[in-house]
Image: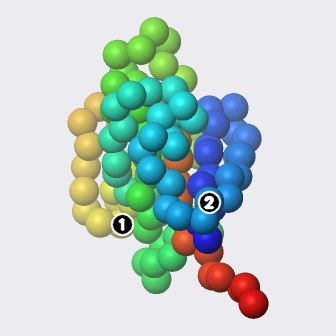
Amino acid sequence: MYKLYLFKTDGHIAKYDYVKKPTFEDMYPLIDTDLIEISTAKMPEYSNRKDGYTDIYFDEEFLLKKEPIVNQFITKSWRAWLASTGRDALPPKVICGNVCVIKKENDEAA
């Protein structure tokens, strides 16, 4: 089982269940894009890793959109990952738009 978390720019989080790992085709309409970029963020509660890092999926062209909206929660988590790994990013150092995170859930079946 997989959970896809959609972090919206207004602060709301939507959850979707999948039997198989969600694909880009599953995420395109949720993110409202046809070009997905992958990065990493420090989000222990949404991670299967001991270090708390997880992949984030977002619109690669968000800065080209009319009046992009900064996703505050994801930007904070992404900057935490940058800082903890000694990385840096080009300005404006933000992530805009809706962002997907996929977490594999423990199967409690049978």
Q: Position of residue 110 (x, y in %)?
A: 75, 90
In space, the residues marked 2 and 1 are separated at their CA atoms by 31 Å
Query: Quick check: marks 2 and 1 in contact, CB under 8 Å?
Result: no
Q: Identify which residue, 70 or 57, lies in the foreground.
A: 57
Q: Identify which residue, 30 or 63, lies in the foreground.
A: 30
Callout 1 amino acid: Ser
Between tags 2 and 1, which lies in front?
Answer: 2
Residue with the mark numbered 2: 18
Earlier residue among tags 2 and 1? 2
Given the current orientation, which residue lies at the most extreme top position?
A: 66
For label 1, the SS is: helix
Q: Identify which residue, 36 or 89, lies in the foreground.
A: 36
Q: Is residue 86 left or right of residue 2?
A: left
The quadrant holding residue 86 is bottom left
Q: Residue at x 50, y 41 (%)?
A: 27
Colouring mode (rainbow / by chain / secondary structure / one colour): rainbow
Mark 2 nearby-residue class (10 Å; few <14, some 14–19, many ≥20): some
Callout 2 amino acid: Tyr
Numbered tag placed on residue 93 in the rendering = none
Q: Is residue 48 left or right of residue 15?
A: left
Q: Residue at x 69, y 32 (%)?
A: 10
Q: Position of residue 74 (x, y in %)?
A: 52, 46
Residue with the mark numbered 1: 84
Mark 1 nearby-residue class (10 Å; few <14, some 14–19, many ≥20): few
Q: In this orientation, does residue 80 appear?
A: no
Q: In this orientation, does residue 41 appear?
A: yes
